[in-house]
Image: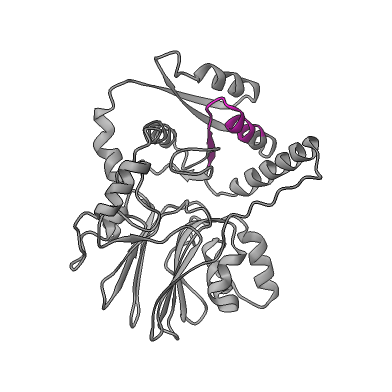
Amino acid sequence: MCETMIHRGPDDDGFFVGSSVALGMRRLSIIDLHNGHQPLSNEDGSVWVVLNGEIYNFQLLRQRLLARGHRFTTRTDTEVIVHLYEDHGSDLVDHLRGMFAFAVWDERRKQLLLARDRLGIKPLYYADLGDRLVFASELKAILPLPGVDRQLDWTAVNHLFTALTTPSSQSIIRGIRKLEPAQVLTAGGGRPLRISRYWDVQFEPDYRSTADDFVEALREKIEESVRIHMVSDVPVGAFLSGGIDSSAVVAHMVRQTDRPVKTFSIGFKETSYNELPYARLVAGAFDTIHHELVLEPDISNILDDLVWHLDEPFGDSSAIPTYMVSRLAAEVTTNTALSSASADTHGCRIRCERRWG
């Protein structure tokens, strides 16, 4: 299973086999490059965790947990999940800010906890095979296992042709499902599999604030978001289209670092689609180290790779330039990039993995 995801984690792998569980991990090193090996446990080995993603408020959580007497052996964000679980159980998700899909194994209770971030930025597939539950960050990691129903899910196919994507809880394969955004799954402990939602979007209109109030509040939100996304032990760049949102991200990045910011832009030969002139203006204004790539109309040489990485059919062609700009960033040794919005990142920091996952 882990070998199918080497492109997601080319830096390290790790395994834990307990009395009723086996956990495997492929790691892309972003924080605590040398000591962030996973799976990771608490002091007595009774709680184990694997994390795909990043916890942006882990430093604040770490300080609070240290004050409560917890001991840490690494500087990685993954370790806060272990100690939060010790204090809060499945409610630990209420304390997290980030993009994540993680698994916690409780050896004493013989219980597995799976969780996915609020907006579903990080994927999490699973299959209930009756006598066992299997899960992975990619659908293709589950397919090699015996007993998985590999027939097409025709309900999901219908949804695909209607909405250009498969349903949030179903995959294109009948025997494999997806944990939805902001959901927690628990299994084991002598109880049936349970799924619950821990968060949802709440719209609360504010009729008393002025337009200037909203402008300032938005500015503060962007500044804070960029700041916590830039916590990294590897270089961080930015995808720059030249539009308002990506330009705002780059502006705040430049203000918050002493190092030159690398920016990456995709252009097209067709003038009506090409936004490179705007990206160049922004890059020049903020003196970034700017990189560009002009896409040719023929994408046949990357289509097989793109389909393989996406796992499921996906009807938004913006996945193509997103893939290409990620590849461009990887080629100039940037492991991570900030993105204001894209087809598969929902405005999050994304990984520019060395094999362009």
Residue for point 24% across, 53% down? 154
| Residue 227 image-quadrant placement | top right
**Residue 236 colored in magenta in the image:** yes
Q: Is residue 156 left or right of residue 57?
A: left
Q: Which residues are magenta?
A: 235-251
Tell me where residue 210 appears, x and y as whole percent.
80, 38
Q: Nearer the viewer, residue 243 or 176?
A: 176
Return the x and y of residue 346 as percentages of the image width and height. 50, 44
- Give the residue drawn at x 26%, y 72%: 129
Work out whether residue 207 or residue 350 is closer to the camera in this orientation and state it: 207
Q: Name the residue located 42 percent from the left edge and 68 percent from the top edge.
A: 39
Above or below — where is 13 with respect to 165? below
Q: Is residue 346 above or below residue 65?
A: above
Q: Residue at x 55, y 61 (%)?
A: 77
Q: In the rendered image of this protein, does residue 14 appear above or below residue 111?
A: above
Quarter of the image where one finds residue 68 = bottom right
- Quarter holding the C terminus is top left
Does residue 2 appear in the picture of this structure? yes
| Closer to us: 289 or 205 | 205
Relative to 34, residue 217 above or below: above
From the viewer's perspective, tell me whether residue 276 is left or right of residue 298: right
- Rendered-image quadrant of the N terminus: bottom left
Residue 260 seen anywhere in this rendered image of the structure: no
The x and y percentages for residue 224 are 68, 46
Membership of 334 in magenta stretch? no
Colour pattern of the rendering: one colour
Residue 70 picture location, percent across and down: 62, 76
For this view, does 219 lie left or right of residue 170? right
